[in-house]
Image (spheres, rainbow, N blue to C red):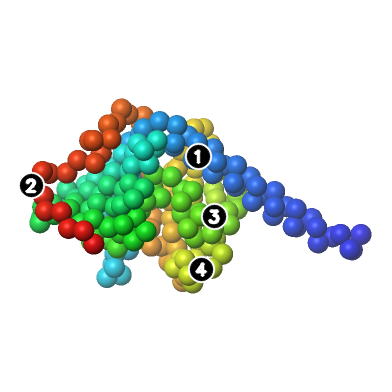
Amino acid sequence: MQRVAWLFPLLFALAFAGAAEDWLAKSEAYLKAAPWEALIEGKVRTPTGERTSIKMRVRTLPKAKIIRIEFLAPDSVADNFVVITPEKVMNYLFLTNQVIVYPRKRARIEGLGLSLSELGTFDELGRRAGLHWRLLGKERGVVRLVGVPGDPERAGFSRVELELKENPPLPRRYRVLDLEGDPVVDLVWRKFERVSLKKAALLAYPPDAEVIEK
């Protein structure tokens, strides 16, 4: 009996890992099923180390893999927006009327120093950081998951915490913690709805804007 006692915690851990992957797959499938719009708010840490409140409207066209993030707050980024495509990221800066274009691999958001591309779906973050997901539990219709990168130093963060609603399996809260365990991103989904979206509308920016390729 002693020879196989170690199997029980291992099998328990594997079962919870499998359950976590199942919930992620359900959420991914739901988010990718049709175009949608969400209102998301919370706090992020800026490149200067300050924690600031943020509010944004996210629109996505899953089949085209296009995400548009329109910033409503704080004032420093209000009226800016970001368009994320499979090839590039376009940052529109309202004050200068410029569109700063980055290759997708070097995606960032001007003024925040973040990518936030995982707000459309969460599978890219998992692949990029080699996350190992675990199911922490379920309570009052909310599923709690945690993802730990295989190499935290290389990933630049210690873990991702994700809360999903059970039905439908929508994101409820999304947190990224740094290597010291302090939150870099802490966002709550306030609203979600299916909408009709056109690719041209998601990619649009003012015709007189200056385009700068990085």
Element under disc 2: loop
User: Of all residues shown, which one is farthest toward the top?
Assistant: 196
Element under disc 1: helix
Nearer to me, 38 or 25: 25
Q: Is residue 59 left or right of residue 126?
A: left
Q: Which residue is mark 4?
A: 152
For marks 2 and 1 on the same chain, the one whose residue lies earlier in the sequence: 1
Which of the numbered marks, if any, corresponds to residue 146? 3
Q: Which residue is mark 2?
A: 208
**Quadrant of the drawing holding the C terminus:** bottom left
Q: Which residue is mark 1?
A: 27
For marks 2 and 3 on the same chain, the one whose residue lies earlier in the sequence: 3
Q: Name the amino acid, label 4.
A: Pro
Q: Kindly indicate the quadrant of the structure image that contains residue 192.
A: top left
Q: Name the amino acid, label 2.
A: Asp
Q: Name the amino acid, label 3.
A: Val
Q: Nearer the viewer, mark 3 or mark 4?
A: 4
Q: Nearer the viewer, mark 2 or mark 4?
A: 2
